[in-house]
Amino acid sequence: MMEQTASPPLAPTTDAPATGHAAIACVLLVYLAVLLLYTPRLVLPMITADDFTYIQESWTWQATLDHLWLPFNEHAMPLGRLSTWALVRLAGRPTLFPLTLAFQSILAVMAAVGMLYLFVRRELGHPFYGLVAMILFGVSTVYAEAVTWFSCSFGLLAVDTLLLSLLAAQRWRQAGWWHALILSAVWAALAPAWSAVGILAGPLCCLYLLLGRKPQTATPAVCLSPRLLVSLSFVPLLGSGAFLAVSLPLTADRIMHLEHYSGQTALEAFQPLTGLWYTARSLVDNLIVGFAGIPWVVLPPAAVIVVLVLVAGLAAWWWRQAPVRRLLVVGLAFILASYVLTYSARASWSYERLLHAWSRYHALPQLGLALFVCGGLPRWHARWHIGPAAGLSTRQMKALGLLTGVLLLVNFPRGMADTPAYNPEQMNLLRRIEAVDARCRAHHISADTARAALPRLPVPDWDNEHNGWVFLRGSNDPRPVSPAEARRLLQP
């Protein structure tokens, strides 16, 4: 395996020490910033477009099983079907759907932020680095759509599961725990069951292990030969392979012939050269300009090339001074693998269309950017007075608080703008459905009878041909009722 140079010894701190719970306080501060950034999502929750389809296809347990392996676009997502069913059941009544579904994306980004902190702290040996990673990823609206739109939250859940796989791989690398290596493969198999981007979990964890060293504690694994250790680094890849082996026979034909490929197969529509060019543009427009909270900027190609040259020079300098480059390599892999895969599959679409409508696909690249930045920070451990003790100093806490505040300030306007516009008509419609459902139970009318008796109910922000009465549950003990009688009984 590829060995890395060791980190320089941590210098003793000369700054004033903070309290023993300083790291916890900073973690809570970051969580508070994330909540503030997406407050509109919770205060004025909305369900829109594909959300209704997800709810309908997971409305009952039988419907959930029937759609379990039905791809949604390119995504074979059985775990997404199950979580939607669970959320709908948890909500109980239609008027609670918007708020209940909103919590999935909020909790998903919270989980990702926490796991990223744990991974970087373990990797670099100090909470300061983990907190910087938390802030760079969590206090950001680069991937706002994944948080503000329920249908896109499954990509964040795939990132969560990928991080679980990465944490398990880290435990194997650092402690030699065999069960952790197996868990890494299991999580890698589950990650794409949320969203197609999860298929990268196995390859990225495999790369991380190939860049690592032998397990660092006195376990039987340290006695393994280097060749065998290299072979074991591919175990997470088996998880991704297992998912493909199960899912492709059930989903491949539909995914290969989706309508938006305009008569081509998915393989024919996949254009890696266009994907690379879109990746280069997105690196500038989203990860650089977008990091400052400025949305939807489309720089001309000449400007993109100039910025890329400057960024490449800065990245090369950052690479040269980094004492341990493992996180830099993994961070770059997160960015490039996600972008190239996504944009190559959408090469037939204009870049401007992807830029304006697809911020959900920037979550993994933003995480990669956080890893890349943090990978070079140990070079300045002495300047930041990062000593061998695990605590934070007052100076470090102030710097972390300032970074959090600045990013919150510049990103908050975009967080507001990317939240779906609140439409009070939607809540009125959900109340109407809820009231009719109550009358169905009171008069022992089944949902099917009610749907046949009532005129079609258009749903705002859903396709015109859909009918809002699909969200009726009806009576658990219905009696035979004619459509005319049902129509009379169900009137307000």
Image: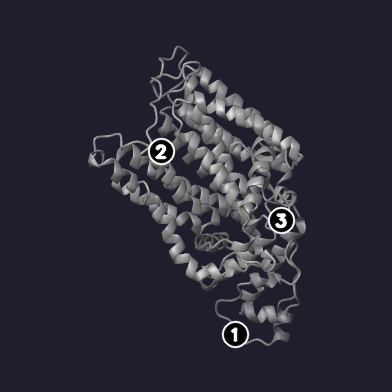
Residue farthest to the front, as pictured: 273
Q: Quadrant of the C terminus?
A: bottom right
- 156 to 436, vertically: above or below: above
| Residue that protrudes farthest toward the top in the picture | 14
Q: Which mark is residue 276?
A: none
* Circle nearer the N terminus (3, 1): 3
Label 2, label 3: how many angstroms apart (C-alpha)? Answer: 36 Å
In which quadrant of the rendered view does residue 314 lie? top right
The residue that disc 3 covers is: 349
How crowded pointer 1 is (Cα within 10 Å; few <14, some 14-19, many 20+) is rated as few
Image x and y of residue 48, in percent: 69, 58
Q: Position of residue 437 (x, y in %)?
A: 65, 71
Is any atom of residue 64 visible in this view? no
Percent from the top left, x then y, of residue 76? 53, 63
Give the residue displayed 38% in from the left and 40% down from the top. Answer: 170
- Secondary element at image label 2: loop
Amino acid type shown at disc 2:
Leu
Give x and y (percent) for residue 68.
52, 68
Which class describes the residues within 10 Å of circle 2: few (<14), some (14-19), or many (20+)? some
**Residue at position x 47%, y 24% from top?**
378
In screen coordinates, is 448 left or right of 484? left
Dot 3 falls on a residue whose secondary structure is loop
Residue drawn at x 62%, y 63% is 268
Q: Earlier in the sequence, mark 1 or mark 2?
A: 2
Q: Which residue is mark 2?
A: 211
| Label 3: few (<14), some (14–19) or many (≥20) C-alpha neighbours in 10 Å | few
Q: Disc 1 and disc 2: Cα gap in Å?
A: 67 Å
The residue wearing badge 1 is 479
* Foreground residue among 218 and 208: 208
130 over 19 or under it: above or below:
below
Which residue type does callout 1 highlight?
Arg
